[in-house]
Image (cartoon, rainbow, N blue to C red):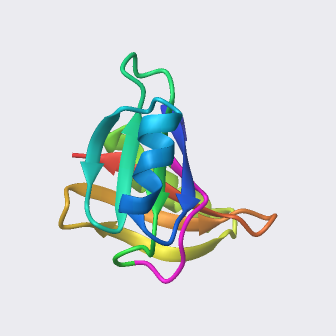
Amino acid sequence: MQATKVIADLPVDDIDAARGFYRDFLGLSVEAFNLGWVAHFRSEDGNAYLQVVTRDETAPENPVLSVHVPHEQIEDAYDEARQAGYEIVHPLTQEEWGVRRFFVRAPDGNVVNVVAHD
């Protein structure tokens, strides 16, 4: 698997309340998307970014990271994780908001969202 981007997924109680700090104070002024339960903020130059998550819409746990892979590699990444014996927390799924993803638990216990955008 070849990661193309890694984004921190920070837990928050309220995205609107978090917006003032992350967007206004830290300068992550571009709100790339907001699904109500997850929002992505980045700097104007695209060099700094993060996501805030209240509660994942379809998975049983929230991830701490979102790792992006090319669309054509997502199934191989899923197979590789399963063959390595890693716990799959959320199976490979085509989500209604246009991504294919799965969640895998790292040996340290952290849950990682492996995602490919269509």
Q: Quadrant of residue 101?
A: bottom left
Q: Residue at x 28, y 66 (%)?
A: 36
Asked whether residue 60 is drawn in magenta, I would say yes
> Looking at the figure, which quarter contains the N terminus?
top right
Residue, x 26% and y 48% (percent of image)?
Answer: 33
Q: Quadrant of residue 10?
A: bottom right
Query: x and y percent of residue 30 in the render?
Result: 32, 33
The percent coordinates of residue 115 (x first, y second) are: 41, 52
Q: Is residue 113 left or right of residue 100?
A: right
Q: Is residue 19 left or right of residue 88?
A: left
- What residue appears at the point 36 percent right and 60 percent down from the top-left corner? 16
* Image position of 27 with respect to 66: above or below: above
Q: Observer-nearest residue: 102 or 23? A: 23
Asked if residue 61 lies in the magenta stretch, the reply is yes
Left or right of 58? Residue 55 is right
Pick out the residue farthest to the bottom.
Answer: 60
Magenta span of residues: 59-66
22 or 111, nearer to the observer: 22
- Numbered disc total: 0
Q: Position of residue 68 (x, y in %)?
A: 45, 42
Above or below residue 28? Residue 90 is: below
50 or 13: nearer the viewer: 13
Q: Position of residue 95 (x, y in %)?
A: 25, 66
Q: Can the viewer see residue 101?
A: no
Q: Is residue 19 above or below residue 93?
A: above
Furthest residue in direction right, as rendered: 108
Q: Nearer the viewer, residue 89 or 10?
A: 10
Q: Main secondary structure of the magenta part?
A: loop
